[in-house]
Amino acid sequence: MKEIIKKLQENKQIQMLLKSFEEEFENNFEIADDIDEFSMITYRDTIFRIWLFSPIVEDTYMSPYYIINRIAQSYKKGDYSIAPHIKIIIKDNNITFETQWNIYSTVENPVMDDLNKLVKHCNPTVVKRESNNFVIDGGETFIDEISYRSGYYIDYLLELSLKLNIIKEIKSIGCQCYQLSELYSNYDSLSNEEKINKIIKASIEISNKNLEEMCKIKNSNIEKDLLQNDVSYEDYDKYMAEIVRYYEEIYNNINNLTNIANIEIMESIKSLTQEKVVNMMANKDFSVFFDINFTIIFGYYLGIINPIYEGPFFIEIFNKIMQVLIREENVLNGLFNLQIAHNLTPFGMKALENTVDKNIENSFKDIPMDLMNNGINFYIENKEEILEEYMDMFEGINNKSNDMDFDFDEDDDMIADLFGEHMSKEIVKHLLDFYDYLFMNKKLKEKTANKHCENVELYISDYLNMRSLEDLNRITKDSMHIFMLDWFIPNVATSASNVRSQLTSLSQYIKFLADKGFVDKSLLQDFKEISKNKEKYVDYFDEYIYGDDEDIFI
């Protein structure tokens, strides 16, 4: 395979494609504002993945991944697939790109290699904590050793290791702890081909279980049917049914609201049919879940399928979408997409030869090399014009979406703050880091993470008027106490649950600051003293509402 990799590295068309991606990344990073920079640093591996599986010419399956494998198979036919992975290193605003080549075959696979690295990392245990930005202890170095820089990938490796009896969970307090299983030697003694077969089988079982739970259906063959494209529209509707029911309830609740003052907004909502609203919301949720639990596992990690996302990918548009989604605390809809089609790779056909119909028709035909080269040249030469057309489409959709924005609480000032109009960019980015910590690391729901960020914003922006991270020294036990008694309860709180919610959010925030090293961990102990008095703050609220001046904190 070394000879094939060398030929691919020397291929002019592939060089043009990879260089085009690198230049696009550099150019967009150079003009990035704080939020764009945050997106490009945090989600750089995601950016490459979406680009790899997106067609360079609209309405085709001619993605960089397809092109590279088409060229590789022209050099040497075989039961393998191959993919570049560009490792993007950003240090002191300098960017370097390192391209590694992943081989997927009956004897080589990056997942198999990374399981071996996880075993070495298990010395003597692997510890997973909710507060850990890199999923596991030591993950900040481990994530740079493995093939894909993603917390989702580490989670997948852990789940796969458990399924294969490589590791086992042991009793622990406040975290999940794993050690090598006594059955590990059974796996370790296998040949590479046997290991890869077990990895694929276990991955199918894991993905199948997750899809069954999400879709609330029992179908032991759902994953195999999906892999070989043996899924009808009726099947797809069944998979979506549970999510659709969930959003039907939300729609009915919205439609029954009577306290929206803006008549035009109310009429706009009612003018949308239930079917349109429900399908739109359900598809977004399903797209995220399906991408994480199917497309990325069998396409990006294992090389079994060649998936295609919809339309050419441009980093500038990605950044604009993320600007909106980060502010709405809905980042997953920008990071994960529903594939529009996929094909089994030659390795996928070999790996699944005992489960896939041998007469199944390959839906991705071999594009003649001269036509493919013309497509690559067209993409490179007309990239700016194509981007301009997509930007016009995006702006049109975005403007239409903005016309439909509404806030049930009608608290425009707070929303303006959340969107950064009254905060410095440094504090906006700080709150986004806090959101990412809650959502990605602590696995809180978007709505919950969003509420915590809004509550913390009241304290650090509205009350402490923090403008930079240098102002973090304003956060003290006394300032939080005075904030609750003299500012939050008199000016904001409307119920006892508001008070409890605010204290819970402050607790999450202090843990975030301590975990990230922004403040000394002694502040955690200080806050515990405040937290112990939670019900006293609630009592104070009650006394304040009913006009009793008794000082319950004496």
Image: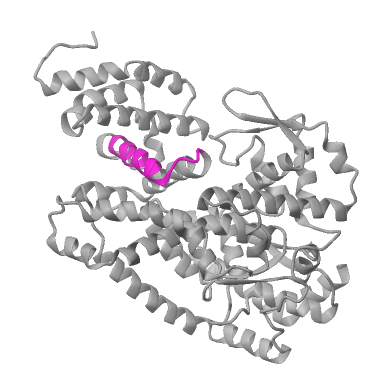
Residue at position x 81%, y 68% in the image: 80
Give the image location of residue 386, x and y in percent.
Answer: 48, 82
Give the image location of residue 35, x and y in percent.
Answer: 43, 56
Q: Does 34 sit above or below residue 103?
A: above
Give the image location of residue 160, x and y in percent.
Answer: 71, 45
- The extreme top residue here reads 554
Magenta stretch contains residue 336:
no
Q: How is the image coloured?
A: one colour
Q: Is residue 421 visible?
A: yes
Give the mark count.
Answer: 0
Residue at position x 67%, y 86% in the image: 372
- Whether residue 380 sits left or right of residue 412 in the image: it is right
- Whether residue 308 sits left or right of residue 388 in the image: it is right
Q: Does 167 sit above or below residue 414?
A: above
Q: Is residue 422 visible?
A: no
Between residue 266 and residue 230, name the one nearer to us: 230
Between residue 102 and residue 305, name the one nearer to us: 305
Q: Does 173 sit above or below residue 363?
A: above
Q: On the rendered image, what quadrant is the C terminus found in?
A: top left
Magenta stretch prevailing secondary structure: helix
Residue at position x 32%, y 39% in the image: 466
Q: Which residues are magenta?
A: 442-459
- The extreme left residue here reads 547
Residue at position x 39%, y 59% in the image: 281
Magenta stretch contains residue 456:
yes
Give the image location of residue 361, x and y in percent.
Answer: 71, 79
Between residue 364 and residue 398, name the one nearer to us: 364
